Amino acid sequence: MNPLSRRRFLRVGAAALAAPQVLPARLLGADAPSKKITVGFIGTGDHGTSWNLRRYLNQPDARVLMVCDVDAARRQRAKSIVDEQYLSRDCRATGDFRDVLARPDIDAVMISTPDHWHTLISVMALRAGKDVQCEKPTLTIDEGKLLIGTVRRLRRVFQTSTEDRSIPVYHRMAELVRNGRIGRLQKIEVILPQQPNVPGDPTPQPVPPELDWDMWLGPAPFAPYTKDRVHFNFRWIWDYSGGIICDWGTHLFDTAQWANDTEHSGPIEIEGAGTHWEGGLYNTVKEYDVTFRYANGVVMTCKPGNPSIKFIGADGWVGNRGWRGELEASSPEILNAKLGPGDLRLYTNPAGEHRDFLDCVKTRKDPYFPVEIGHRVSTVCHLANIAIRLGRKLRWDPAAERFIDDSGADVLRSRPLRSPWKWEA
């Protein structure tokens, strides 16, 4: 397929907005569970294929129709994986995500791009009538607010894509804390990794012939190509991501907010100190020590090390050490505590984020990590980065979603888009 012109894509989007918001016929009727939800993949890098694509291909009620990546080698690899699974050559491949959004036979999209593309592509997909599963996080606080408004106005299904809420150890500790098994929660200790190990090479290099460099940059500021700028390494550059705090914080901060019953809110004060990568290409946070204070009196700290989380209450503690590490507690009574019929049970889907999203496409209910909660946990990450950058205590109003009496911090809630990309009215 040839890339769509901007004018043609906007006509397609306008038509989708004008049409009634109804379910595709193939999702209705007595045999609905056996019908296929058609999916387009946007971003087919390592995580997009090894994690997201592989899991969709194992879902009996999903059918991948199209794959998109600005790197021709990666999209051809993804197409080969799909064709091999289906024993056909029907999967289409493109380098322009607008080709995916323009197809009326695609119900949903899975977005696995770098962070600076997450919200823009999600909003365009929603306006094109698609349900969306998108990798975390947002690039800015204000982008998240825009995304929420679009999802709710168009009544689409949106899943913030992380597996944490389906992982038993994190679900279990959140339920124990929410049900008072450690007494009144007082403190949360979050430990995130420290990456990378080298500052990156900023030396401009020829753009590989298989890469559409201008499309990779998209709404980000123009910069010369270097291999250390793309693919996995985009995470360590401000123009495309929020560094290690956004990459890993959206995992463990979500469990923290879930257990603290602040998943629809956030902290009211943030203090942070740290350093940034210097002397090379990378410029996000390197060392960090951040403290968050919540209106309910809970204090959350964040430092680098072995990714872990610990909840400390008046009557004991619960947590783990290492990613998906075994549950630990201050006593066998807490560790082995049973939840009864009158206790709060937190919604999860043990089959994971992809299965949960597909189920919700059918039921039109919110997934286990809906857009508002994804936005709130991304906001916690952004608040940490802003506090470190400014080097002063920040006061945050989680209801108004703005800094209190701090116009300098408020400016950092958003970033401009590079022309011709823009937020459509």
Image (cartoon, rainbow, N blue to C red):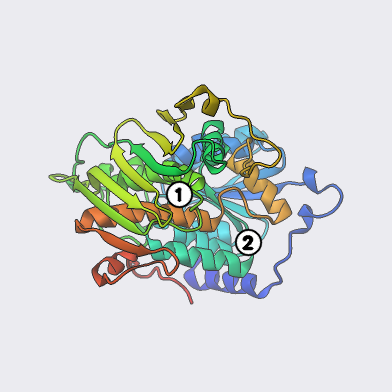
Residue displayed at 15% across by 46% down = 278
Judge left or right: residue 399 versus residue 30. left
**Residue under pointer 2:** 156
Camera-nearest residue between 265 and 62? 265
Element assignment for label 2: loop
Q: Residue 415, relative to residue 41: is it above or below?
A: below
Q: Which residue lies furthest to the right in this view?
A: 30
For the residue marked with disc 2, what is the amino acid? Arg
Spot occupied by residue 105 in the image (x, y as percentages of width and height): 68, 56
Q: Residue furthest top?
A: 332
Element assignment for label 1: loop
Question: What's the mark number on residue 124?
Answer: none
Query: Counting other residues with Cα less than 10 Å from the Cα at mark 2, is it few (<14), some (14-19), or many (20 or more)?
Result: many
Spot occupied by residue 23 in the image (x, y as percentages of width and height): 74, 60
Camera-nearest residue between 298 and 378? 298
Q: Is residue 217 visible?
A: yes
Q: Which comes sooner in the sequence, label 1 or label 2?
A: 1
Q: Residue 171, relative to residue 284: is it above or below?
A: above
Query: Counting other residues with Cα less than 10 Å from the Cα at mark 1, is it few (<14), some (14-19), or many (20 or more)?
Result: many
Camera-nearest residue between 293 and 381? 293
Spot occupied by residue 157 in the image (x, y as percentages of width and height): 62, 57
For the residue marked with disc 1, what is the amino acid? Lys
Question: What's the mark number on residue 136?
Answer: 1
Spot occupied by residue 222 in the image (x, y as percentages of width and height): 27, 60
Q: Is residue 210 visible?
A: no
Counting every numbered tag in the picture gives: 2
